[in-house]
Image: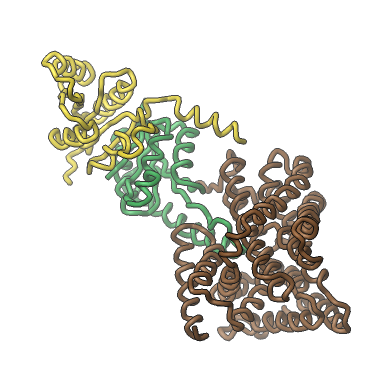
Amino acid sequence: MSDIAIAALLAGTILIASTVSVEIGLSVALIELLGGFVVGNAFSIDVPSWLSFIGSFAGIVLVFLAGAEVDVPQFRREWRASISIGLVSFFAPFAVVGLLCYYGLGWNHRQAEIGGLALSTTSLAVVYAVLVETGLNRDLVGKRIMSATFVTDIGTVAGLTILFIKPTIWIVPFVAASIALIVGLPRLSPWFFGRYGDRVIEPEIKLVFAILFLLMWLGDRANSQAALPAFVLGLVMSSHYVQHRMEQERMRVVAFAFLTPFFFLKGGMSVSAHALWANLGVLAILFVGKMVPKFGGVYPLARRFTAPHATFTTLLMSTGLTFGTITSLYGLNAGIIDRTKFSLLIAVVILSAIVPTAIAQRFFQPRAGHDRERVGS
Amino acid sequence: MPFERILVAIDGSEASNRAFGKALELAALAKADLTALAIEGPLPAYAATIAEVDEVKREKDLFFDALASRAREQAARDGIELTVVVRAGHAAEVISSFAAEGGYDLIVLGHKGHFLRDHLLGSTADRVAEHAACPVMIVR
Amino acid sequence: MKENGSMVRRVLVATDRSETAEVAVRFAAEMATRFGADLVLVQVVIPPATTSVAMTEDLVRHARELAGDHGFGTVVVGDDPAKAIIEAAETEDVDVVVVGNVGMSGRKEFLLGNVPNRVSHGTRRTVVIVNTMQRVEEQAQKKRRFFR
């Protein structure tokens, strides 16, 4: 198939995915992943290089957006109670899955690290949706869960940036540029956005994109990944976006209309149905490998910090989606893991988005007094 | 005693508008308290970004604010003081538990045909009827 | 549709004269009284059982007890109770059909659907389903508490 033919096919898939998402109430990302999986396997399409490129960029944009969506003032208030849950929620599955991959499944050192990272995540968005739905996001328990999720995410992006770095001279400009931008952008942005913002030609989005591309390039040269600086950059910009809702909205529009669909499609297309089918046992082992340490680590702490919703908290901390996909795709693109390992990791990531969430909502969702209620006069 | 507190489920659909009309008439005749309950359906499940959740939530809020004020206006024209409550969750479950908690005597709702889902799971009305403690009126 | 004063002019309720069915009947009677409507009791006889004059008289007497001059009773014969109730609603030209929900979760009725559901799906008239098994919700709550 020619590039144009593939592009047309994918554009159609993206369109259908968005309508299906609205109809059945599942997130568009999940449908795009599944759509990519179906299209990729049904037409046996390999991911073309242009898609791979857009996808990598979209991954960094997603990390930036995730950072920008963190409620920093709330985190400042709740971090003490949340940091232990968040750290354990990252390190326990990272260590257990990593060791499991290395010793149990015979993956090499770097592959095991990717495996551990991909399954260490907690999905901020999955957690957020559940909390908003129950109204718990306004309660202390909900705020603590959100803050803990954020800590876990920091662990994942930090691992992604630091673990695979190779000592070259390029580390210096990568680190220097990251720090300069993280310190400088919040200071520069009021002037820049004031002078050039609020226009259809969107200089402010272009500024963010240019910075992210710069970080991606420098990270690439340093044999690293720009996830950590992109996330922190999002964080330092979050208060700006809170004040300028329109800007945030336009950024989201650009990301959702064009970038993130390609990212998730690419993820789905790279999953091999055959590899999954042939390794169902390994799939189950990896899934258990994520769930057991999440439970063993988070539950005892949750009993202390988010009682009486300890089980609910633990289940939510066991979810994963976006960052797991980003980590797995990074491993695949960098040639660290092959398609089989990638397929297994993505499948476990998707399972972990669905299974713990569904169980939490069905059986452990706090009810009374937490409805998202607004009474008309 | 039936017909002192009536609960009507509204969602802006043709069927629910008919049910609402009927509930207004019943409430006027029986001089009953009338509460309209609107259910915000679930947010996108398993979202990948907070943005997606936020956008859907905002759209739903706008829709239900408009629905609530339309319902109140229509009730006011019939001289009925209407309470509107918006709650999130799965319709059948929320309607029946809300009715039980609020001690309602009757639930009025419209029947919205949805061929495939009705045959697999039963309609919302069927499921409310199955779980509600009080009588359920299904308006055609 | 013309609404002369009240939209509830004739209320039909299905009964097999059992204790549970009487819960629905009492609700229908109360509704008829409240809105000044006729009350029509319908009893479905499933062959090979047969109807008798005594059965009809008893049903009519019961209707009179509940609604005085506004009380009516009719016994119909049919293999399928849901269909018989829907047809009776047509011939009696009622505004509201009241049925109890006994057997709503019955396994046997999985394929055909249960009586109240099929009545509510099969008629164009307004249907009221009365929960005649008070314990249903309590049991559901107990189950939920167990899982929490």
Quick check: can you spot residue A76? Answer: no
The structure residue drawn at horizontal position 61% and vertical position 69%, both measured from the top left corner, is A245
- What's the colour scheme? by chain
The structure residue drawn at horizontal position 46% and vertical position 57%, both measured from the top left corner, is A24
Q: Position of residue A329 (x, y in %)?
A: 67, 71
Residue lying furthest left in this view? C53
Asked whether, in this view, residue B62 is left or right of residue A308, the answer is left
Q: Quadrant of residue A87?
A: bottom right
The structure residue drawn at horizontal position 66% and vertical position 78%, both measured from the top left corner, is A57
Of all chains in the rendering, the one displayed in green is: B
Q: Position of residue C60 (x, y in %)?
A: 16, 18
Of all chains in the rendering, the one displayed in yellow is: C
Q: Position of residue A36 (x, y in %)?
A: 53, 70
Q: Quadrant of residue A167?
A: bottom right
Quick check: can you spot residue A299? Answer: yes
Q: Position of residue A175 (x, y in %)?
A: 84, 78
Q: Quadrant of residue A279?
A: bottom right
Q: Colour of chain A?
A: brown
Front residue of B110/B35: it is B110
A228 w.r.t. A287: above or below: below
- How many numbered markers are drawn? 0
